[in-house]
């Protein structure tokens, strides 16, 4: 077992013991019933009391054999209509633009999956204007907060059952 796989097995063990309420993080189960430790299926709940509250946002984490030296790639899933998450720091592909996930910026090998998911949850309600990834949500967030909030609240209704 390599360093990445050993670390991920330990992260899974720790997650099962203690994780934040409403969050999900587990290795993907393959058709034959085995688990793919390098590909995780996660759910990030919107913070209660925010425009994201009530939504449960599916997310994939893809790790390489270079983990934890390099961060996982994290992507949000699309809504039931096939649209990307409406957020200034989420690319149309679902990839998340967050310093914690950037090997050149704030990534540190000591960061845990739990810390990453909590950081991603915080980003939902607190976009980074300095690092936009999607033009329309960025423009609306910057110029018309009420419209941005309306769009996010509408979107969150599509993610209540995930």
Image (tube, helix red, strand yellow):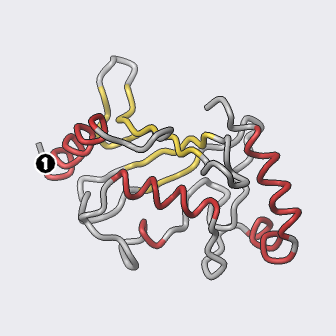
Residue at 53% in and 45% down: 44
2 over 141 or under it: above or below: above
On the image, the x and y values in percent for residue 158 come to: 75, 37
In the displayed structure image, the side of residue 46 where residue 27 appears, left or right: left
The answer to which quarter of the image holds residue 26 is: top left
Give the residue at mark 1. 2
On the image, the x and y values in percent for residue 62 come to: 39, 49
In the displayed structure image, the side of residue 53 where residue 9 appears, left or right: left
Residue at 87% in and 65% down: 146
| Extreme-front residue of the structure | 49
| Extreme-top residue of the structure | 32
Q: Nearer the viewer, residue 55 or 93?
A: 55
In the displayed structure image, the side of residue 114 where residue 8 appears, left or right: left
Q: Nearer the viewer, residue 154 or 68?
A: 154
Residue at 62% in and 54% down: 93
Around disc 1, counting alpha carbons within 10 Å, would you say few (fewer than 14), some (14 to 19), or many (20 or more)? few
Residue at 20% in and 51% down: 4
On the image, the x and y values in percent for residue 135 come to: 76, 70
* SS of the residue under disc 1: loop
On the image, the x and y values in percent for residue 24 come to: 45, 37
| Extreme-left residue of the structure | 1
Q: Nearer the viewer, residue 15 or 64?
A: 15
In the displayed structure image, the side of residue 28 where residue 12 appears, left or right: left
Quadrant in which the N terminus is drawn: top left
- Give the tally of numbered discs: 1
Quadrant in which the C terminus is drawn: top right
């Amino acid at each position: 077992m390599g360093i990445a796989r050993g670390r991920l097995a330990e992260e899974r063990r720790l997650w099962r013991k203690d994780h934040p309420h409403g969050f999900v993080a587990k290795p993907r189960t393959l058709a034959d019933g085995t688990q793919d430790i390098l590909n995780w299926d996660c759910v990030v709940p919107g913070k209660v009391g925010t425009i994201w509250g009530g939504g449960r946002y599916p997310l994939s984490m893809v790790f390489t054999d270079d983990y934890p030296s390099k961060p996982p790639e994290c992507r949000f899933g699309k809504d039931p209509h096939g649209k990307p998450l409406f957020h200034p720091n989420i690319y149309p592909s679902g990839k998340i633009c967050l310093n914690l996930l950037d090997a050149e910026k704030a990534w540190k090998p000591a960061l845990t999956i739990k810390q990453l998911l909590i950081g991603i949850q915080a980003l939902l309600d607190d976009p980074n204007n300095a690092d936009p990834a999607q033009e329309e949500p960025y423009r609306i967030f910057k110029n018309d907060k009420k419209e941005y909030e309306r769009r996010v609240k509408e979107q969150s209704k599509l993610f209540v059952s995930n």
